[in-house]
Image: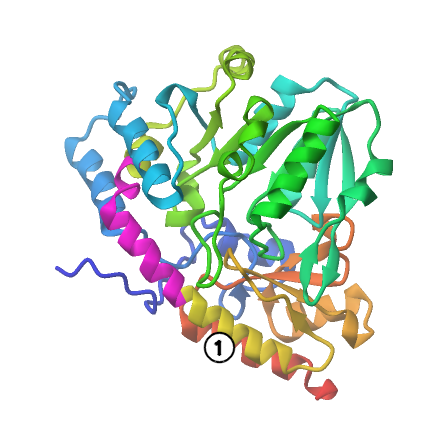
Amino acid sequence: MSTAPNFDEIINRHGTHSVKWDMMEKLYGVSASEGIAMWVADMEFRPPHCVQKAVEDMAAHGLYGYYGDDRAYLESIRWWMAHRHGWEVPAEAIFTTHGLVNGTALCVDAFTAPGDGVVLMSPVYHAFARVIRAAGREVVECPLKTEAGRYVFDTADWEARITPRTKMFVLCSPHNPGGRVWSVAELQAIAAFCEKHDLILVSDEIHHDLVYPGHKHTVMPLAAPGIVDRLVVMSATTKTFNIAGSHSGNVIILNPELRTRFAARMNALGISANSFGLFMATAAYSAEGAAWVDALMAYLDGNRRLFDEGVNAIPGLASMKLEATYLAWVDFAGTGMAPAEFIARVEKGAKIATNHGASFGLGGDNFLRFNLAAPRAQVAEAVARLQAAFADLQ
């Protein structure tokens, strides 16, 4: 049996408890039978064969008890970070959480107090603000600027936005949405800002394996080694290998004092790992998994080119060129339409469910986020529908 990935395969996910497809009609009014789900950030692809085999081996054994002896799991993470990112990670620095939203929430809980401020570069992944506010902390938004069709930031602009109660900076690297791969100089500027204002820096690098040709992600501890005493790095197999349902992620903390504080909160809250996620992650972080990711990125590169060419041909629409991630960020400001109008055209006209830009914070109102991790035929169909929905502009 061939284990080569077939990213063109159409897999019917209707009725499988897929939030992306089975909740689309309830949340967007777009039926799964007619619509295209391009909102939730999971892929329409099967994971590598090695991951599927790990689950099948668990099922064949037939016992699902508590997981123990995590040496192989930790070594797989260390191998991946060393071979794919050039970063040597000590095993004792690695914590496993129930995904990285949970990891973010634990960092907020461990390293800040109610009423403290947490910096976000907005627009940014919406779950960050949700967990920060739910914890009784203040979201300090530092809006990104657009130059030459890509996001940039100005640390001087941030100075007036923080207060003595600002204690943490949550960085999305690579950036979601917008797909920026931050340069080493940009990462160093963020690190310097955090040092200047005594901020804990939480670097969410969940998309760090999903980088397109011509761009290179640098993990924060290599970009700014001097920041490691106040740094938390978050990574996961879940986005890379399309196993988000395993709800596992890694929080990596090099500073022993911060590790102690983080471990205390995990213990107090009774956080322990899911054995399915650990077996799947161990299998994914392997040579076979690496080859699968390389094939995935070649395929996604074709999808982003197809999508950008078709969408950018529609007057008034501008798709920000992705440097990383599979999440296209499309600006509708040029149409002159209010968000309610262009959203209606996309959802009711094109029958496509997307993430609304306003949910990503300041600067997102005129945008929609489209998930391109799908068979190319589906992406092409989405482009055709968008062109038809905005045909009067052409």
With respect to residue 242, does 250 lie above or below?
above
Q: Residue at x 48, y 15 (%)?
A: 270
For the question of whether residue 212 can be seen, the reply is yes
For the question of whether residue 242 can be seen, the reply is no
Q: What colour scheme governs how the chains and residues are painted in the rendered image of this protein? A: rainbow
Horizontal arrangement in the rendering, residue 160 relative to residue 78 (left or right): right
* Residue 133 image offset from top left, x and y in percent: 73, 31
With respect to residue 172, does 98 lie above or below?
above
Number of other residues with Cα within 10 Å of mark 1, as a class: few under 14, some 14 to 19, many 20 or more: some
* Residue 329 image offset from top left, x and y in percent: 63, 62
Q: Main secondary structure of the magenta part?
A: helix
* Residue 226 image offset from top left, x and y in percent: 57, 28
Number of callouts: 1
Q: Does dot 1 land on a helix, a strand or a loop? A: helix
Quarter holding the N terminus is: bottom left
Between 377 and 141, the one lying in front of the other is 141
Quarter holding the C terminus is: bottom right
* Residue 149 image offset from top left, x and y in percent: 68, 67
Amino acid, disc 1? Ala
Residue 284 lies in the magenta stretch: yes
Q: Residue at x 15, y 31 (%)?
A: 61
Query: Residue furthest toward the right?
Result: 160
Res 168 → quadrant:
top right
Res 322 → quadrant:
bottom right
Residue 32 lies in the magenta stretch: no
Between 99 and 251, the one lying in front of the other is 251
Horizontal arrangement in the rendering, residue 9 relative to residue 349 (left or right): left
Q: Where does label 1 land, which residue?
A: 380
Query: Residue furthest toward the left?
Result: 1
What span is colored magenta in the figure?
282-299
